[in-house]
């Protein structure tokens, strides 16, 4: 009954009409993996590599933690509960907390904490607010999912800013092997926590009602909300980014990018081609239906994506005098 009542908010928002689909889908895109694969490298390569590195760490940590929390709460999505909710987007994971909402607070909230002009800060805050609203309209999250996502994102953002100020100077004097060892540890902790959550809920099953509505949306396709893909992606990309920064900072220090606008555009185009090769190209080659093998290859793929963004592309830019 609780979840049925919660769907009334989704139904109310959707009752305003399908004309809202495009603007809501646009806001939702600002929280998609594809958007982060676009904006984070753009910041890293063309604006400020130190800021890009911090955003990359924040987003990957947020992704990994979000995956484990979804397994812990294993709550439904609105279109699972009611056939009156239109699924304008298709999601196969659990609902609480909303990943889009959580990551939006982390990213846009962190940027808001850095700007001095109040109107820009409020504009960035409005972005993550509308990202959350868009997920409710699209029928993939309850308002509870969004509120919990904002809360978790806010806690992570506060802890990151606090711990960065307190320990960044100490970490900066660590040896490279210590930094890499710490990155490996964090990466595997994210995966271990997720695996533990999955094992704790190994007997969970869809209710018949949920399964009926899911079949209607996915046309009989089997979905697995306990899939580890998202957590593996986050932990591997985190590891690749950190190792890449440790390696490249020996010769290219982090900081603001001072190249000309033309060179920045060329840097971004070349770098993005590399991201597409590792992210999309290897996805076409690697099998995705072999237990453990597919997960291991996904881990390798996203380590390469993270390493390319943080080290491979900057090294190439230097060689090309960009």
Image (cartoon, helix red, strand yellow):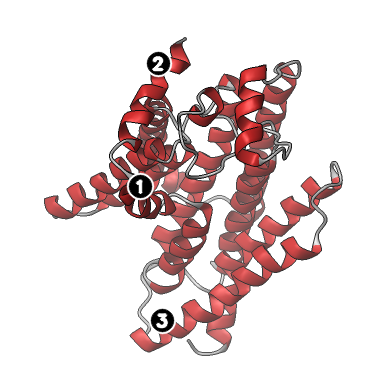
Query: Residue 282: x and y, percent?
Result: 74, 65
Q: What element does badge 3 sit on?
A: helix
Query: Residue 47: x and y, percent?
Result: 36, 70
Pointer 2 with pointer 1, Cβ within 8 A:
no
Q: Nearer the viewer, residue 209 or 107?
A: 209
Q: Which residue position holds label 2?
A: 5
Of labels 2 and 3, the one closer to you = 2
Which of the two labelled residues, at mark 2 and mark 1, occupies the earlier sequence position? 2
Which residue is at a point 63% across and 43% down the rendered structure image? 230
Which of the two labelled residues, at mark 3 and mark 1, occupies the earlier sequence position? 1
Residue 264, compared with residue 162, is above or below; it is below
Q: What element does badge 2 sit on?
A: helix
Q: Which residue position holds label 3?
A: 264
Which residue is at a point 66% across and 25% down the rendered structure image? 211
How far apart in space, not on screen, are marks 2 and 1 (Cα)? 22 Å
Residue 162, compared with residue 2, is above or below; it is below
Q: Is residue 179 left or right of residue 23?
A: right
Q: Which residue position holds label 1?
A: 18
Which residue is at a point 31% across and 35% down the rendered structure image? 13
Which residue is at a point 50% across and 49% down the rendered structure image? 57
């Amino acid at each position: 009954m609780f979840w049925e009542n919660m769907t009334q908010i989704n139904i109310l928002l959707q009752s305003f009409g399908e004309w809202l689909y495009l603007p809501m889908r646009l806001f939702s895109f600002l929280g998609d993996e594809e958007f982060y694969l676009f904006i984070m490298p753009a910041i890293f390569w063309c604006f400020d590599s130190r800021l890009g590195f911090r955003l990359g760490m924040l987003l990957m940590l947020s992704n990994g933690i979000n995956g484990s929390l979804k397994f812990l709460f294993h709550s439904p999505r609105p279109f699972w509960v009611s056939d009156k909710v239109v699924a304008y987007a298709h999601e196969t994971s659990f609902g609480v907390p909303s990943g889009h909402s959580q990551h939006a607070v982390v990213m846009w909230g962190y940027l808001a904490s850095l700007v001095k002009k109040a109107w820009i800060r409020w504009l960035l805050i409005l972005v993550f607010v509308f990202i959350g609203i868009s997920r409710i309209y699209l029928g993939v999250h309850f308002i509870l999912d969004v509120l919990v996502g904002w809360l978790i994102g806010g806690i992570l953002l506060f802890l990151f800013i606090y711990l960065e100020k307190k320990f960044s100077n100490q970490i900066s004097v660590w040896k490279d092997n210590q930094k890499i060892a710490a990155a490996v540890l964090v990466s595997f902790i994210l995966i271990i926590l997720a695996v533990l959550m999955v094992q704790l809920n190994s007997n969970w099953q869809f209710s018949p009602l949920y399964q009926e509505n899911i079949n209607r949306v996915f046309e009989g396709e089997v979905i697995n909300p306990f899939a580890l893909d998202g957590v593996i992606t986050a932990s591997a990309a985190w590891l690749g980014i950190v190792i890449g920064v440790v390696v490249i900072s020996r010769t290219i220090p982090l900081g603001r990018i001072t190249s000309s606008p033309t060179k920045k555009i060329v840097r971004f185009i070349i770098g993005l081609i590399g991201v597409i090769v590792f992210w999309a190209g290897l996805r076409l080659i690697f099998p995705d239906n072999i237990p453990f093998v597919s997960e291991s290859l996904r881990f390798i793929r996203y380590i390469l994506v993270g390493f390319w963004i943080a080290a491979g592309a900057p090294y190439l830019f230097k060689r090309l005098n960009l």
